[in-house]
Amino acid sequence: MKIKLAILVALVVAAVWAVLANEPAKQGQGAILNLESERNLESPQPLACLPLSEVTATHNPVDLMAGVAQCIEQEDYQQAADLYTTAMTFGFFDTLRVSDQTAHQALMVVRMNAFTKAAQEELVKLQEVIAARLKEPELCMRMQSLGAPQYHPDYMIQHGMEAFSAMPEEKGGLVADFDAQAAWEYALQTVPKCGVDTAAD
């Protein structure tokens, strides 16, 4: 239920900000300005509900979560689980290579947006299927064959505070001397637990 709790908290915060942003400015108070940079949470190749075999390393987490949302609507929880796990693994990889830590919350927002229309029982079902899929070697094999993400993480970089400074343009928004292969292996071990003995869990 940790996923559902995080989603509910995020939704409450988002709802409060939405109310504040749309409320007319009161006498003597300034209006709230919502700044958003270009390519923030961008989805260049939004996916439908499809099997992981049709996903490539050029699809970013926003693309993948679009497919998750559609799979939930179609009650195809296995494909939703596979796309979700891949999205979160790619997103975790991005947090390792994006230098602006304030940008890392993009992953939480992407997840929240995908689950906006889902009912609690649908999220519970998804969580159950994800837990089952993580125990099956097939999922790790498919993700390992995908390889490390091959897109530039603009969706995340442009979500952070540095997007409003010259810094991303100067260094591309990425960690210097980033070891993509090591980071990818770490992401696989951390999110889907590929190659990790979880028998004691």
Image: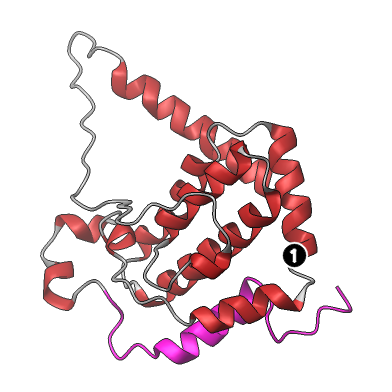
Residue type, mark 1 in image = Arg
Point out residue 59 in the picture as x, y percentages from the top left corner.
Answer: 39, 65
Residue 42 magenta? no
Q: Which residue is mark 1?
A: 133
Residue at the (62%, 39%) spot, across then down: 74
Crowding at dot 1, Cα within 10 Å, few <14 / some 14-19 / many 20+, comes out as some
- Quadrant in which residue 5 is drawn: top right
Residue at the (24%, 71%) spot, across then down: 173
**Residue at disc 1, secondary structure:** helix
Give the magenta part as a residue range: 174-201
Left or right of 122: which side holds 83?
A: left
- Quadrant in which residue 172 is drawn: bottom left
Q: Is 46 in front, or is 86?
A: 46
- Most distant residue in the top direction: 27
- Residue 14 drawn above or below residue 89: above
> Is the stretch drawn in magenta largely helix, strand or loop?
loop
Residue at the (78%, 52%) spot, across then down: 128
The answer to whether any part of residue 114 appears in the image is: yes
Point out residue 85 in the picture as x, y percentages from the top left corner.
Answer: 60, 63
Quadrant (top left/top right/bottom left/bottom right) for the C terminus? bottom right
Point out residue 170 in the picture as x, y percentages from the top left corner.
Answer: 12, 75
Q: Is 14 in front, or is 181?
A: 181
